Image: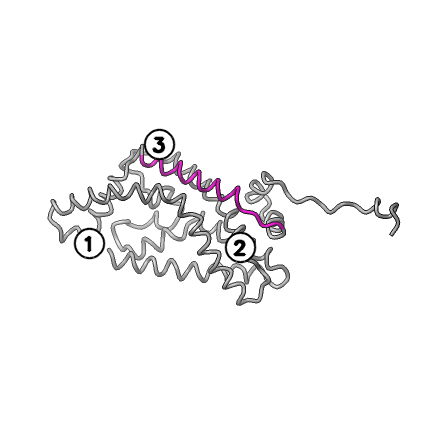
Amino acid sequence: MTPENEATIPPPPAGMSEISRLTGVFFEPGKTFEDIAQRPTFIVPLLLVMVFSLVYMTFYSQHVGWERQVRHQIETSKQAAQQTPEQREQAIQIGAKFAPIVGYAIPIIVPVIYVIISAVLLGVVKIMSAPTTFKQVFAVMSYSGITGIVFMLLAIAVMFMKSPDDFDLQNPLAFNLGAALDPNGSKFLYTLGTSLDVFVIWRIILIAMGLKAAGGKNMSFTGALMAVLIPWLLWILCAAALAGLRG
């Protein structure tokens, strides 16, 4: 090949910028996850989710307070009927001391959760013979997670529009079937209902699109969707059963 011919060869197309990826998750998810699959990175979206989680927990702690949440959970549990008022109050005070620790630890726990979920999803897609790497799956998890930023911003807005007594940390937006159920009724059904959430479904679809992009020709969108749905359904059934037992 002569130098003249080499000079006429166009350079390979540049990948999407970080800003383009972050906005593309919302407006061009197919193209965006194709780019993420080719160049899997995760630092920026992961840090954004961690920062916004900290902001959300800080606003909740200052505006609503953890004691309200703990008090509601304990007073509406089955165990409350078996406790004296003094025992309930003692349990509330203990819970109110530990709840902020758990709340502020959430930003640190996020990467750990992503690692666990990514490992499970990778195991599923490997069974389906898709040539996918852990880094690709983790990147998909990280970028799909920025939908949670929209959730948290809306939840913060609702938090300041409502009375602190009316804000429910477990279901702040009620974009799910749980909004039509009595939270003091069947805990099993309520947990199932709140799991069928618009934001959850949105993220499941995005993760499936990302797995499809990472798996290439060996992975159909239906197969990728099943790879996400099956572990998720098993998880929410176990969580709902546990909630039902605890009452």
55 versus 242 height, above or below: above
Three-letter amino acid code of the residue under disc 2: Val
Out of 202 and 213, give the one closest to the viewer.
213
Q: Are marks 1 and 3 in contact (CB under 8 Å)?
A: no
114 versus 218 height, above or below: above
Label 3 sits on a secondary structure element that is helix
Q: What stretch is highlighted in magenta?
A: 39-61
Query: Residue 219 location, x and y as percent?
Result: 59, 62
Which quadrant, please, contains the C terminus? bottom left
Query: Residue 156 location, x and y as percent?
Result: 39, 35
Which mark's residue is nearer the viewer, 2 or 1? 2
Three-letter amino acid code of the residue under disc 3: Phe
Dominant SS type (magenta): helix
Q: Which residue carries the number 3 mark?
A: 160
Label 1 sits on a secondary structure element that is helix
Q: Residues within 10 Å of mark 1 (few under 14, many from 20)?
A: few
The answer to whether 8 appears left or right of 78 in the picture is right
Mark earlier in primary sequence (3, 2): 2
Disc tally is: 3
- Decide whether residue 125 is among the magenta residues: no
Task: Give the label on residue 137, or none.
Answer: 2
Out of 33 and 9, give the one closest to the viewer.
9
Q: Residues within 10 Å of mark 2 (few under 14, many from 20)?
A: many
Mark earlier in primary sequence (1, 3): 1
Q: Who's the residue at 42% across and 47% down the image?
A: 110
Q: Which residue carries the number 1 mark?
A: 78
Q: Rounded to the nearest whole Å, what is the CA distance between mark 2 and mark 1?
A: 40 Å
Query: Residue 4 location, x and y as percent?
Result: 88, 45
Mark earlier in primary sequence (2, 1): 1
200 versus 59 height, above or below: below
